[in-house]
Image (cartoon, rainbow, N blue to C red):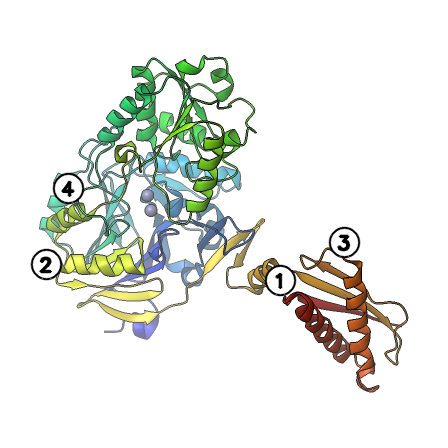
Amino acid sequence: MKGYAQTGTPSAEELLFLSLGGAGEIGMNLNLFGHDGAWLMVDLGITFGDDETPGIDIIMPDPTFIEERADLLAGLVLTHAHEDHIGAVPYLWRRLKCPIYATPFTASILRRKLEEVNLHKKAVITEIPLSGRFDVGPFNIELITLTHSIPEPNACVIRTAAGTVMHTGDWKLDPDPKVGATTDEAALIRVGEEGVLAMTCDSTNVFVAGHSGSESDVRDSLRETTARFENRVVIACFASNVARLESAAHAALENDRSVALVGRSLWRFYEAAMENGYLTDIPRFLTPKEASDIPRDKILLICTGSQGEPRSALARIARGEHRDVHLDPGDAVIFSSRVIPGNEKSIGRLQNRLTELGVDMVTTQDDESVHVSGHPACDELIQMYQWIRPQVAVPVHGELRHLRAHAALAKECQVPQSCVAPNGTLLRLAPGPATVIDEVFTGRLALDGNRLISLGSSVMRERRGLMENGSAVVTLVVDRAGDLHADPQIATQGVFDQETDPDLVDGMTDAVMDALEDMPAKSRRMDDAVCEAVRIGLRRWIKAICGKRPKTKVHLVRI
Ligand SMILES: [Zn+2]
Ligand SMILES: [Zn+2]
């Protein structure tokens, strides 16, 4: 039998799995399944920049592997509308040009994103009803409704002639999710009985014992917590958590308050929810402007910015920069969200500002029940393995430590084989046993302004270097013999304050002139040699004075 290893194309007997993003990190999911001359993509998400990526907000998987095989890409199925699952579609679809499949709410959210980049007429989204079954190339796909922290999370049961894989997407087992149906247990049991070769499953909360809890607990808790306060109440949560918006609305109603949404993304999700029949049983949300006329004991504000994002509504309110909303001593902010690792500092800054304003705060540290996670804790993972009973467990949606712990858990659940397959590991699931057959190129692309650049590129290295050490630029005007025709012009950035330290300018000028004078006459006739000698001389001088090695450049004008 000739397979991928010989031909570079998955054969009819083979079922392959490959992550290009999301296995080895939490965020930017991109999963590929290969069978019978075709590839199926499940999810195409982004992650966010941090201190390590100056000037970069959005990062996504490098799709080169599948871009080179775009003619074999049968389609893209989206499990749900979180950014780490759909966020890269507007940026990468032009490179892939494949049909897109999603349930109605996810399609509504994606359509808004595609409109922003003028792709809505080109990138065709086929809407699949909940629990729908459809073919994409040689893959037959059944969606199974699960619960998560956004409407319409779907597991994909991918049936092929070489076997069945269940890709869970993000999920938890919430018996009372408040918005949308609960987990379709009957379908999961049926699929398990039918026989599943492999399950690619969410690892996010594998280190959390017990159960993730229910949105219904949060609903009770938000109502009771709101009742404790007499002035303005702000609930900070993720805009995509539509059930949480409804819970906040109930907390307001039952405490005789009106509710306003503050933050553009909240309005986007509200509109998409209404389009799909969610949030239609509660009174219309008010705009921040409408809320500004309401007495402070009669209003509840739902805000974005629970992670301390500086441009978000809550951060602007805390800085006193919001046009319609301000907070006074005695007002309260309930953080109905968890701290996403990496955001501790920005959340700390936000909470310190709110404290300065005299605002009371409730976080999950004070009261665990103001938030529940959308991902399965151990008991839920065990339950899923009991239902599906796959032959092979392939943990995804986690850092390496999560994947390993999840593989061990699957083993305890009697799964015969567990594979830790970080991004780029091409796994052959069938014909079995599951085997690593290749390591393919993976990388990260960053949205830099309006271009995508490789995160490993010289642009990013230079930018980090500039941030850490600053820069110096020298302009030299010399004649053919290499003698100076004017004083060297030296400009530094982020090194010295040249205005308050004029001596340093003289010192740098001397260093440049010395470097030039020390050169043999012959070398001084060569541009490259002059530039390099001056660059090294100046850099050495700055290093001796201030211990820094700025990025140093020499412009040579030969007259
Ligand atoms: Zn996710
Ligand atoms: Zn999610």
Label 4 with label 3: CB-CB less than 8 Å: no
Q: Which residue is drawn at the image coordinates 28% and 33% (left, top)?
A: 367
Label 2 with label 4: CB-CB less than 8 Å: no
Observer-nearest residue: 192 or 476?
476
Q: Disc 3, ligand 1: is the CB inside 8 Å?
A: no
| Image quarter of the N terminus | bottom left
In the image, is residue 422 above or below residue 147? below
Observer-nearest residue: 466 or 43?
466
Q: Disc 2, ligand 1: is the CB inside 8 Å?
A: no
Q: Which residue is drawn at the image coordinates 77% and 67% (left, top)?
A: 508
x, y (%) of residue 149? 30, 37
In the image, is residue 73 above or below residue 275? below
Observer-nearest residue: 496 or 325?
496
Q: Name the residue under label 1.
A: 469
Q: Specify whether 550 is left or right of 336.
A: right
Badge 4 local density, few (<14 within 10 Å), some, or many (20+)?
some
Q: Helix, strand, or loop for circle 1? A: helix
Badge number at residue 500: 3
Closer to the camera: disc 4 or disc 3? 3
Q: Gap between marks 4 and 3, in whole Å?
A: 73 Å
Badge 2 local density, few (<14 within 10 Å), some, or many (20+)?
few
Q: Gap between marks 1 and 2, in whole Å?
A: 54 Å
Badge number at residue 187: 4
Q: Mark 2 points at which residue?
A: 414
